[in-house]
Image (cartoon, rainbow, N blue to C red):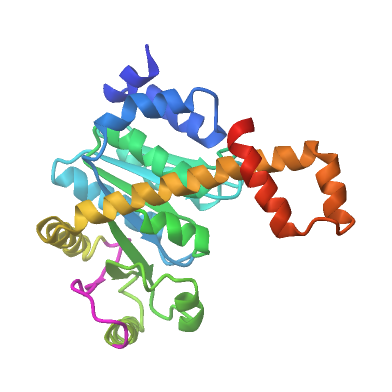
Amino acid sequence: MDLVAGVLSGDPRSIARAISMVEDGAEGLEELSKGLFPHTGHAWTIGLTGSPGVGKSTLAGQLVHEARRRDQTVAVLAIDPTSPFTGGALLGDRVRMQAHATDPAVFIRSMATRGHLGGMALAAPEAVRILDAAGRDRILVETVGVGQAEVDVAAATDTTLVVVAPGWGDQVQVAKAGILEIADVFVVNKSDREGVEAAMRDLRQMIHMGAETPWTPPIVKTSSTEADGIGELWDAIEEHRTYLETSGELDKTRRARLLREVETLTAERLRAGARELLASDVALANDLAERRVDPYRAAAILAERVPSER
């Protein structure tokens, strides 16, 4: 089966193989992207981010259940930026989602960026497009941590959920990671625990102190282990979708994301070309090391040569 045709037909093996190509930065990825790109832009993408231990994985499982209850097809992409072998919570996700294992309308995949040019910043959107082209109505993108790379990936979705838990710790560190600025919906998970009202109060205060925007992120209480508040969370996601579609922001934000992606891809290719030239041009490297050429001039020389030699 042709891989593009297999993905477009929703064949699980073809989807898995295509995502593996993205992970590895395999040969043929450009042809795959060319074949699938015209068939994308239909799925609604939802990012889940937050500190480890706040229950993102269990929450993702409940959102999958809610999607199926509403007769929607869904995919979960759990991204590990480090290694495909460290598994951890990602492997646990699959265990927790066994209830959906035999459901052909659910696709679950943990993904590591092993050899992809540009790492997570480019691999994640490509993997999401594969799932989009495969006809999934909703795509959940879960990130492991709250570093800048994880925050960027979660933010590159239509609706970003920032998940916290009662006693969520050092608010300054969370804010420093940029996690508060990207939230379209705040989720206070594990709401059956003590301290949930304090967590919600802190979030309201932070939202109030932030810059005024047309969309004010709602705060939703959930208990993913008890499935409490999941319907309300889904409704909040749909309200954000309605806002984006009716305000015209959806087209603008999706366009801006694509342009940033192309900019990053171009920069990565130029960087790879410059690296190759520096490795082969011993004279330039020596001139730089001996202080005969300064870094700015060396960069200008490479910039002139990279486009013609790649």
Residue lying at 20% horizontally and 54% vertically, measured from the top left: 250
Q: Is residue 235 left or right of residue 264?
A: left
User: 163 above or below 265?
Assistant: below
User: 191 above or below 42?
Assistant: below
Of 90 and 171, the residue lying toward us: 171
Residue 69: horizontal and vertical position, in percent? 16, 46
Of 95 and 78, the residue lying toward us: 78
**On-image quarter of the N terminus:** top left
Toward which corner of the image does residue 42 lie, by quadrant?
A: top left
Q: Per the image, is 85 magenta?
A: no
Residue with the most extreme top position: 1
Residue with the most extreme right position: 290
Residue 149: horizontal and vertical position, in percent? 51, 58
Q: Per the image, is 215 magenta?
A: yes
Residue 274: horizontal and vertical position, in percent? 67, 43
Residue lying at 32% horizontally and 63% vertically, measured from the top left: 161
Of 270 and 231, the residue lying toward us: 270
Camera sees residue 35: yes
Toward which corner of the image does residue 4 lie, by quadrant?
A: top left
Residue range highlighted in magenta: 209-226
